[in-house]
Image (spheres, helix red, strand yellow):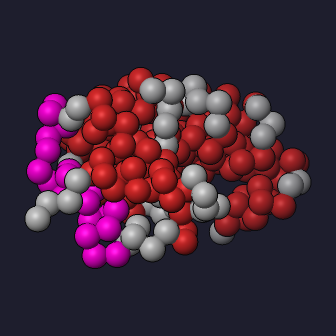
Amino acid sequence: MTKDLHAEAEKVRSWLASNAGIDQYEFWWSEDGVVDVVQDFLARVQPESWSEQDVTDLLYLLEQSTTGYVVELFAQREPTMLAIARHSLARGGIADDDIADQLRYCVQYRDEAEALLFEFMKSEHERTRRLALLSLAELGSKAVPALAVAAWDTGHEYLRLGALAALQIIGSELLPTYLAKAQEDGREHLLALARKFLG
């Protein structure tokens, strides 16, 4: 018997209303639990047939997930990954960090993935912007050098880490300059990454 996505999402909502975190929810990973239900739903229902409630519950469960495994289920088919990314952006960026991270694998739909990642780069969340930048680098976007410089110029340590990593991924001629800047910055994580890249 096929278990209902909406019923499982409601169980999670009810449980979280009186409990602190999803990690203790015993039916998340269990057989026929939340993860199995999401996997079954994605196999049966194509994105163009998703209802508004389907989207609401899929994004809710993605947002509650504490591992990358659930979003990786979407990434098994590039059109599904692109669809959930569009819905996330339309609803204010729900689960945006996990989605931005997985868009790097949409190589057959590179142009659309790149356009979506540019939107995720506007997120108010540092982690989302950093992961979007890294995904753009993995996709070989020509916009990466300028975006990396802008990320560096924020002064935020983790965005600077993302900028360095993105420049390294694309083999940018800017990398030596920013490795030197990382050493001047002097913060522990930046120094460690610079040393790693310098070999």
* Residue 28 left/right relative to 108: right
The part of the image, by quadrant, that contains residue 127 is top right
Residue at 42% x, 33% y is 88
Closest to the observer, 194 or 110? 110
Indicate the position of residue 181 as horizontal and vertical percent values.
80, 44
Dominant SS of magenta comes to helix
Q: Could you tell me which residue is drawn at 53 percent across and 63 percent down?
A: 22
Q: Is residue 100 left or right of residue 128?
A: left
Per the rendered image, the range of residues in magenta is: 30-49
Locate the C terminus by quadrant.
bottom right
Q: Is residue 101 left or right of residue 70?
A: right
Regarding residue 76, the answer to whether it shows in the image is: no
| Residue under the image location 32 percent in, 68 percent down | 33
x and y percent of residue 171 in the render?
A: 51, 47
> Was residue 9 drawn as part of the magenta stretch in this picture?
no
Closest to the observer, 20 or 189 = 20
In the displayed structure, 188 sits above or below 146; it is: below
Q: Residue at x 78, y 40 (%)?
A: 156
> Residue 29 versus residue 157: which sits nearer the camera?
29
- The answer to whether 155 is drawn above or below residue 186 in the figure is above
Residue 18 visible at all = yes
Where residue 157 appears, as percent x and y from the top left, is: 78, 47
Image quarter (top left, top right, bottom left or bottom right) of the N terminus = bottom left
Number of callouts in the render? 0
Left-right relation of 24 to 68: right
Above/below status of 100 relative to 114? below
Q: Quadrant of residue 163?
A: top right
Residue 62's spot in the image, x, y percent?
Answer: 43, 50
